[in-house]
Image: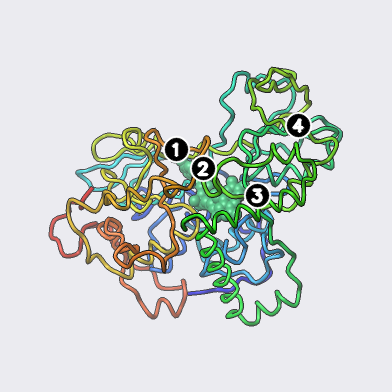
Amino acid sequence: MTRTLEPTLQGAAATAPAPGPLPAHVRVAVVGSGFAGIGTAVRLLQEGVEDFVVLERASSLGGTWRDNTYPGCACDVPSHLYSFSFAPNPRWSRAFSPQPEIRAYLEDVAARFGVLPHLHCDTDLLAGTWDDDALLWRLTTSRGDLTADIVVSGCGGLVEPAYPDVPGVGSFAGPAFHSARWDHDVDLTGQRVAVVGTGASAIQFVPAIAPQVAHLTVFQRTPPWIVPRLDRAYTEPEKALWSRVPALLHASRAAKYWFRELQLLAFTDDGRLRSAAQREARRHLARQVPDPELRARLSPDYAMGCKRVLISNDYYPALVQDHVEVVDCGVREVTPRGVVDASGREHEVDVVIYGTGFRVMDIPVARCLTGREGRTLGQEWSDGGVQAHRGTTVAGFPNLFLLLGQHRARAQLRRVHDRGADQLRPGGPARARPARRARARGPPAGAGRLQRGPAGPAGRHGVEHRRLPLLVPRRERPQLHPVANAHLHLPAADPALRRRGLRAPHRRPQHRPLTHPSRKSTAPWCC
Ligand SMILES: Cc1cc2nc3c(=O)[nH]c(=O)nc-3n(C[C@H](O)[C@H](O)[C@H](O)COP(=O)(O)OP(=O)(O)OC[C@H]3O[C@@H](n4cnc5c(N)ncnc54)[C@H](O)[C@@H]3O)c2cc1C
């Protein structure tokens, strides 16, 4: 069911308090209330599953878009695409909307689709252990214990701020904070500010704070590839048209989707398209940075696509200002007075801001979930690197689904529901097939070198390498998710339910068996 969101995106009002004590048992425990968690909750409701909770450790929902409040914070995927397909929003103010709007959108979706009664804020999942006899997860939270047949982790990948691994972090005498924990009480006006890091967040807040500060020192480790940001404010007639003719909104979304998919060709072809994309990025740099010496320091020396490609129209112009300095030799140490660069020069500052990203390979949920063999996810991953079948299930962790962002949640649960459990093979599917594993090992061959990108202990990246669907041979196109089918057996589609939207009568939750429907045994499959 698709609902077009109308202008009343009232963020704060949508955040409800926790609905009383936790139930003793639920069919599904969704952890996290970002896009993944909220999307999963909506999908469960659409399928008539009401016996679930959304556990959120913070005091309100929103995930990334609640935590990142730094000046200039916005999405870098067009808003018509960076939103749920079932809840298109014709009122986005810009092509790339700012953080407050995205947060309000998520809160509004949660309220409109009936997720709030299931939301338990201030509820931190501290531990989860699979009970192989009872065939359920035993969960310990900061607000008590519960059990769940199924755990869906929407804990996010970009949740735990990362700080530079240099001596003295924490010793700085003045205010120091991470971009994901922006301290709005610190007035930067007229201050000498050090920014450590030049990633996706820094290139958004550096231009926003530069006009305010007396002096800005930007510490760069690896210069990012930056391409123009095709941003603009949407006009009222455009928004009115999208409101009245939802098909146009869908068309806009589809156009953006295919445009971005085609951009992927730049990273998957034999190099010509990538070269063209790199030339365009270099032209962008040349147009905005006239000084050849600074330009050289801002020029990446690795192939585009090895590291996240950034979009900005105002980052380079911010750096060319007289009171802004780029230090590209790295950080040796942080002292009570400032930051010492790798050449030994100390930069005295009043405020230090870390734009150093997140601990993506060290997510806390990996330490707190214990699977069938008494091993935590973290231990499982410490051997072979962070990996999951189709980015979602891990052998030895039955009825656990790892989600990220908004698209996977919906697509996966839809697949689970629509396709049934017909492609299950015991023994195999919990582990990625060799071909898929090979593709999961990071950038395509010949894509150049990644200087210091995050990788697992085995150097593998825990994401699937994306290819344009039409370019993928049929036999390699995504298939049914077998493990998901094995365990997440949702009620059958009900046309009446779909017609009535989410106001369907409560269905009796099916607690067990969590097995392939064709089997008599209650033993879980595969994992
Ligand atoms: C500044 C910034 C900009 C971004 N821009 C884009 C973009 O433009 N396009 C894009 O595709 N992606 C972007 N991302 C990535 C973004 O994180 C994902 O798109 C998406 O929002 C992730 O959603 P999620 O629900 O998986 O995780 P999150 O939004 O991170 O939500 C995870 C939630 O889980 C909660 N949680 C974690 N652990 C526990 C626990 N143990 N118990 C209970 N709750 C827990 C957290 O508090 C949080 O609320 C951006 C990220 C950042 C930081």
Q: How far apart are marks 3 and 4 (CA)?
A: 20 Å
Residue that label 1 marks: 455
Mark toward the start of the polypeptide (3 vs 2): 2
Q: At label 2, which amino acid type do we have? A: Arg
Q: Is mark 2 on a helix, strand or loop?
A: loop
Q: Is mark 4 on a helix, strand or loop?
A: strand
Q: At label 4, which amino acid type do we have? A: Thr
- Please state the horizontal and vertical placement of residue 422, each as a whole percent of the image: 22, 66
Q: How far apart are marks 1 and 4 (CA)?
A: 28 Å
- Left or right relative to 272: residue 519: left
Mark toward the start of the polypeptide (1 vs 3): 3
- Please state the horizontal and vertical placement of residue 367, each as a whole percent of the image: 39, 34
Tag 3 and tag 2, C-beta contact below 8 Å = no
Mark toward the start of the polypeptide (3 vs 4): 4
Mark toward the start of the polypeptide (1 vs 4): 4
- Residue 226: image tag: 3
Mark toward the start of the polypeptide (2 vs 1): 2
Q: At label 3, which amino acid type do we have? A: Ile
Residue that label 2 marks: 57
Residue at the image position 38 percent from the left and 66 percent from the top = 414
- Left or right relative to 441: residue 526: left
Q: Distance between the residues labelled 1 and 3?
A: 22 Å
Q: Residues within 10 Å of mark 2 (few under 14, many from 20)?
A: many
Q: Does the residue labelled 4 lie within 8 Å of ligand 1?
A: no
* Residue 320 to residue 331: above or below: below
Residue that label 4 marks: 217
Q: Is mark 3 on a helix, strand or loop?
A: strand
* Nearer the observer, 150 or 183: 183
Mark toward the start of the polypeptide (4 vs 2): 2
Q: Is mark 1 on a helix, strand or loop?
A: loop
Residue depth check, mark 2 versus mark 1: number of the one nearer the observer: 1
Residue depth check, mark 3 versus mark 4: number of the one nearer the observer: 3
